[in-house]
Image (spheres, rainbow, N blue to C red):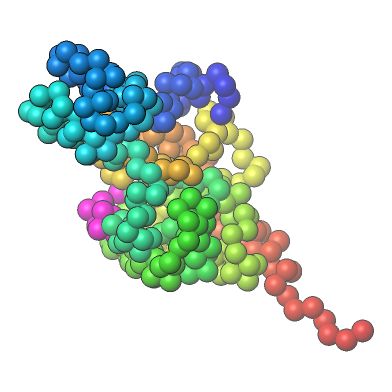
C-alpha cells in the first residue's frame, strides 16, 4: 500500500487514512471521550475536580476525554456516578462494548485461553453460510494440518505470553474444520503463492500441508484460488488478510487485535476488494499446478541424505 492510498475495483483511489480500520476505531474512541467530556461539563466539574472525586490522576481524565485511552466498564460507571448522570451509563457501556467488539485486543480475547477462543469461533462459524477468505502470507486456519496449526498458534506467545493450552487449542482448531464438509455452507479461499512457501513448520510438515490443500480443493463446496508469483495485481495489492462472513462482518487480524467491521460500506468495500483478488487467482487444475510446483521445490529437502562415503 502506498502512502497516497488504495485503488478500488472501480478505479477510485481513497486516502489511506480514511480506509484505515485502526483510524476508524480511534474515531469511535474519540467520540466516546467527547461524550464523557460533555457529561463532566454538564455537571460543572473541571477535569481536576473530577479526578479528585474519583481519586484518579488528572492525566487519566484527559486521556479518556481525548480518546487516548479506552475506559473500562468500571470507569464508565464511576464517571456517570460522579457526574450525576447514571441514566447515561447503559448507553455509554453499549458504545464501549461496540468499540471493544470492533477492536478486540488479543490479550483480552485470549485471557480465557486459546482453546476458549477456538471454541468461540466454532460457535460463530456455525451461523455463517458463505465464507470468503483472503490470505497473502499464511494458510487459513480452516485448511491447516495439525503441525502447521500448532506452529501458527504458538506464535501467540509473542503477543499474550506463555501458551498453556496449545494442545487443546490445536484440537479445537481441527474441530472447526468439520464445517468444510457441511454441504449447506460455501467457502471461497484465495491464497497467494507466498502463503504456500512461507515456512511455518518443518519441510515434511509443509508437504503434508500442501497435500491437504490439493485434497480440499476437490470438495464441491470449496473454491480454492491461488495467485501465483507471475500474476500482476492490476487494481489492488495483497496488503493484508481478511475474512468476510456472509454479508454481516469482515474480520481482520493484526499483531495486537482482532478487528470486526460491520458497517455496510466496509463490508461492501471488502467485498469488491475480494472480487478483484479472486478475479486474478487460478482455480482447479491451474491452482493445483501452482501447489505442485511448490511441492516439487520443497520435496528435495525432505529426502534422506545418502549414507556412507
Give the percent coordinates (x, y) of residue 128: 26, 51
Give the answer, above or below, for where 138 lies relative to 273: below
- The answer to whether residue 229 of the structure is visible from this angle is yes
Task: Give the quadrant of residue 302.
Answer: bottom right
Residue drawn at point x = 53 percent, y = 45 percent = 136
Numbered range of the magenta stretch = 122-130
Task: Give the quadrant of residue 246.
Answer: top left
Residue drawn at point x = 58 percent, y = 69 percent = 205
Relative side of 269 to 92, left or right: right
Give the percent coordinates (x, y) of residue 2: 58, 24
Which residue is at the far right?
309
Residue drawn at point x = 14 percent, y = 23 percent = 83
Q: Nearer the viewer, residue 235 or 167?
A: 167
Q: Nearer the viewer, residue 228 or 164?
A: 164
Residue drawn at point x = 57 percent, y = 51 percent = 195
Q: Is residue 125 magenta?
A: yes
Give the percent coordinates (x, y) of residue 292: 62, 61
Q: Is residue 291 magenta?
A: no
Which residue is at the far left?
87
Amino acid at each position: 500500500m502506498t502512502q497516497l492510498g488504495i485503488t478500488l475495483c472501480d478505479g477510485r483511489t481513497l486516502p489511506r487514512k480514511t480506509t484505515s480500520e485502526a483510524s476508524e476505531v480511534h474515531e469511535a474512541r474519540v467520540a466516546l471521550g467527547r461524550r464523557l467530556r460533555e457529561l463532566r461539563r454538564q455537571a460543572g466539574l473541571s477535569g481536576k475536580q473530577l479526578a479528585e472525586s474519583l481519586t484518579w490522576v488528572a492525566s487519566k481524565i484527559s486521556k479518556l476525554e481525548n480518546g487516548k485511552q479506552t475506559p473500562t466498564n468500571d470507569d464508565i460507571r464511576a464517571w456517570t456516578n460522579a457526574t450525576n448522570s447514571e441514566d447515561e451509563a447503559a448507553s455509554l457501556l453499549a458504545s464501549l462494548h461496540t468499540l471493544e467488539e470492533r477492536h478486540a485486543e488479543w490479550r483480552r480475547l485470549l485471557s480465557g485461553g486459546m482453546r476458549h477462543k477456538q471454541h468461540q469461533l466454532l460457535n460463530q462459524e456455525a451461523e455463517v453460510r458463505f465464507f470468503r477468505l483472503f490470505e497473502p502470507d499464511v494458510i487459513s486456519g480452516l485448511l491447516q494440518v495439525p503441525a502447521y496449526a500448532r506452529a501458527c498458534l504458538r506464535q501467540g506467545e509473542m503477543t499474550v505470553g506463555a501458551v498453556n493450552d496449545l494442545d487443546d487449542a490445536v484440537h479445537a482448531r481441527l474441530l472447526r474444520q468439520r464445517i468444510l464438509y457441511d454441504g449447506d455452507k460455501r467457502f471461497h479461499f484465495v491464497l497467494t503463492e507466498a502463503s504456500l512457501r512461507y515456512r511455518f513448520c518443518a519441510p515434511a510438515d509443509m508437504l503434508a500441508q500442501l497435500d491437504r490443500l490439493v485434497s480440499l480443493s476437490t470438495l464441491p463446496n470449496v473454491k480454492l484460488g491461488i495467485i501465483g508469483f507471475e500474476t500482476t495485481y492490476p487494481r489492488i495489492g495483497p496488503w493484508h488478510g481478511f475474512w468476510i462472513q456472509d454479508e454481516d462482518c469482515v474480520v481482520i487480524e493484526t499483531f495486537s487485535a482482532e478487528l470486526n467491521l460491520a458497517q455496510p460500506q466496509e463490508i461492501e468495500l471488502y467485498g469488491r476488494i475480494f472480487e478483484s483478488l479472486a478475479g486474478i487467482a487460478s482455480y482447479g487444475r491451474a491452482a493445483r499446478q501452482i501447489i505442485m510446483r511448490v511441492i516439487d521445490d520443497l520435496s528435495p529437502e525432505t529426502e534422506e541424505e545418502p549414507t556412507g562415503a
